[in-house]
Image (cartoon, rainbow, N blue to C red):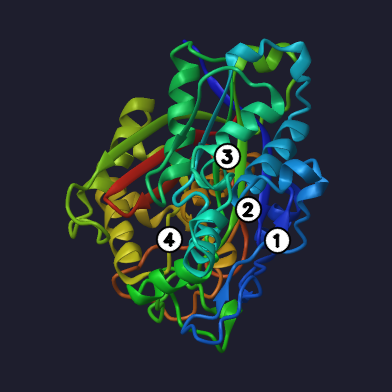
Amino acid sequence: MRRVVITGLGAITSIGIGKDNFWNSLLQGNSGVDYITLFDTENHGVKIAGEVKGFEPCDYIDKKEAKRMDRFTQFAVAASKLAIEDGKIELEALNKERIGTIIGSGVGGIETIEKEVTKYNDRGPSRVSPLFIPTMIANMAAGQVSMRFGLKGSSMTITTACASATHAIGESFRMIKDGNLDMVVSGGTEAAITPVSIAGFANMKALSTRNDAPSKASRPFDKDRDGFIMGEGAGIIILEELNHALERGAIIYAEIVAYGSTSDAYHITQPDPEAKGATKAMALALENGNIDYKEVDYINAHGTSTYFNDKLETLAIKNIFKEHAYELNISSTKSMTGHLLGAAGGIEAIATALALRTGKIPPTINYETPDEECDLNYTPNKMVERDIKYAMSNSLGFGGHNATILFKKY
């Protein structure tokens, strides 16, 4: 049986660029949420987000090429470079036809779309860039990564809203396990802190309006939560067949043992009120991995800081783990990073792998007022140490998409 392990990590986030900066900020409980600088928010009701700070595309990408990429693609290429370097992967020594690129994105090049539509409206169709289409399409992150590194295995993009990156990692796991590939560059990328995007999410009442206290605004599972915080960035991991990794002397962060994927088939934005889809995704992961639920120690929750998500994800965990639900450590790292939409599962997979490797569980910050409907151990406010054997990462997306990955300590 082919086993799949994680051998490289690349993070571009609001709390740090690079695996170590990201991880140290998580353990310290640092918030990456602040006032938006990417555009003028004077006319916006929401003025806060989790922006990536200090990102210079030319540190990772040729200047001319960077200009031909939307910000979400720049993030993907940069995070992939970091993951490949972290994994000490000598690509020229490997069969690149056996290396795939599967990267999720929820909205793709929305920044480019907004800019070009404005040009069209202000100056007419002749002013729209000839690079508009290949810059904004969501698959271009995977396409540019495969071209940048010469990866000729299966290359694709998965778009399942906020479950995109977790689905990308899960499908990468399947491809390696089934023998189609030996290695995959996978995860998610997103850059949706734009005027129209923020307005759209705000007008559907999904975003927090706690503008007076940005670092306190993302508060998953807290009774006073009032919506999620938009984040941006990319989380890319290297998945590799175990023997392939061992032969090249790779550092192994964790093993992926199973993956569950379901659909609520219920509503365009609201989760199933009985949490049936999320429950089944976790059940499938345990079933496919042949793991007893009592062996799981940690869940990196989807934990968006919205009323319905946090309440119903809690219900799903109770449905699956029964009395053991109260023995679990659960945390939402979105309390620090904000919600990266289609990239969320990528950075959360990195956090989960590092928790397994180090025995340190990042907290859910801003947890101040318990909610009777969310009564589990959300690892409030401070990191804790615990020997973790198995861990889960959940992602739940608009449209009813549910994905769960089950990790094992290696």
Q: Nearer the viewer's eye, disc 3 or disc 1?
A: 3
* Crowd tier of the residue under label 2, counting other residues whose Cα lies within 10 Å: few below 14, some 14–19, many 20 or above: many
Residue to which mark 2 is pinned: 71
Q: Is residue 21 visible?
A: yes
Say which residue appears at 49% left-offset and 83% top-offset. Answer: 44
Q: Nearer the viewer's eye, disc 2 or disc 1?
A: 2
Residue to which mark 1 is pinned: 25
The Cα–Cα distance between marks 3 and 2, rounded to whole angstroms, is 10 Å
Say which residue appears at 43% left-offset and 74% top-offset. Answer: 199
Vertical position of residue 92 compared to residue 83: above or below: above
Residue to which mark 3 is pinned: 141
The Cα–Cα distance between marks 2 and 1, rounded to whole angstroms, is 23 Å
Residue to which mark 4 is pinned: 303
Element carrying mark 1? helix
Sequence-first disc among 3 and 1 = 1
* Crowd tier of the residue under label 4, counting other residues whose Cα lies within 10 Å: few below 14, some 14–19, many 20 or above: many
* Residue farthest toward the bottom in the current orientation of the protein: 212
Tell me the kind of residue under disc 3: Ala
Element carrying mark 2? helix
Tell me the kind of residue under disc 1: Ser
The Cα–Cα distance between marks 1 and 4, rounded to whole angstroms, is 18 Å
* Crowd tier of the residue under label 1, counting other residues whose Cα lies within 10 Å: few below 14, some 14–19, many 20 or above: some
Sequence-first disc among 2 and 1 = 1
Percent x, y of residue 59? 82, 47
Q: Is residue 131 left or right of residue 55?
A: left
Vertical position of residue 87 compared to residue 3: above or below: below
Say which residue appears at 61% left-offset and 36% top-offset. Answer: 237
Tell me the kind of residue under disc 2: Arg
